Image (cartoon, helix red, strand yellow):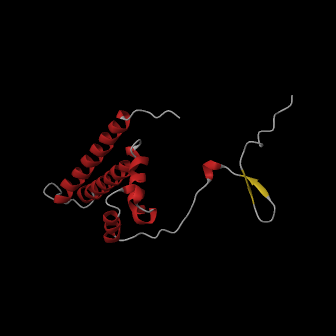
Amino acid sequence: MHMPDTDVSQPRVKFYSGESVPLELHKVRIVQKLHLRPVEQRLQAMEAAGYNTFLLHTRDIFLDMLTVRFLLSYSTRPIHVFGVLGLIASGLGVLLGLVLTFEKLALGHNIGNRPLLLLAVVYLAIAGLIVLLFRWAENRIPARRA
């Protein structure tokens, strides 16, 4: 059986040496140094353009576009952002709980009236709420079709 050549439609990159390699688009990363303008300069550019965003240059509003990009990329998967916060909070709560358990069992200290116990419980409660809330939010977002 003859297999068709699938490499024909794949984009290729040609180097100065003449070597040609296939370009795997899902692995391409572009790295560029950012020159961010201060807020005052961005506001002046907005006023000079008469608050018409179509008249602005990219260099004047790059930080704003980066913020919008961040918000749009995580609007479909909120648990990816806030799940880390929940993981940190639960890690702190468990760590404090382990320290207090060690103090109670090994050292015999009274931990019932310590604010650290309340802090451990609060961390665990916050972690649970964050994970539940944003997991629920993720399930409420309609799936995008490719």
- Residue shown at 53% from the left, 35% from the top: 146
Outermost residue on the left side: it is 113
**Residue 27, image x, y percentages:** 62, 52
In the displayed structure, 141 sits above or below 36; it is above
**Residue 105, image x, y percentages:** 26, 55
Number of labels in the image equals 0
Tell me the quarter of the picture where residue 135 sits. top left
Outermost residue on the right side: it is 1
In the displayed structure, 118 sits above or below 49; it is above
Q: Nearer the viewer, residue 35 or 28?
A: 35
**Residue 112, image x, y percentages:** 15, 54
Q: Nearer the viewer, residue 124 or 61?
A: 61
Question: In the drawing, does residue 122 fall left or right of residue 86?
Answer: left
Question: In the drawing, does residue 55 fall left or right of residue 47?
Answer: right
Tell me the quarter of the picture where residue 106 sits. bottom left
- Residue shown at 67% from the left, 49% from the top: 24
**Residue 4, image x, y percentages:** 81, 34
In the displayed structure, 81 sits above or below 141; it is below
Tell me the quarter of the picture where residue 55 sits. bottom left
- Residue shown at 29% from the left, 48% from the top: 127
Q: Nearer the viewer, residue 68 or 44?
A: 44
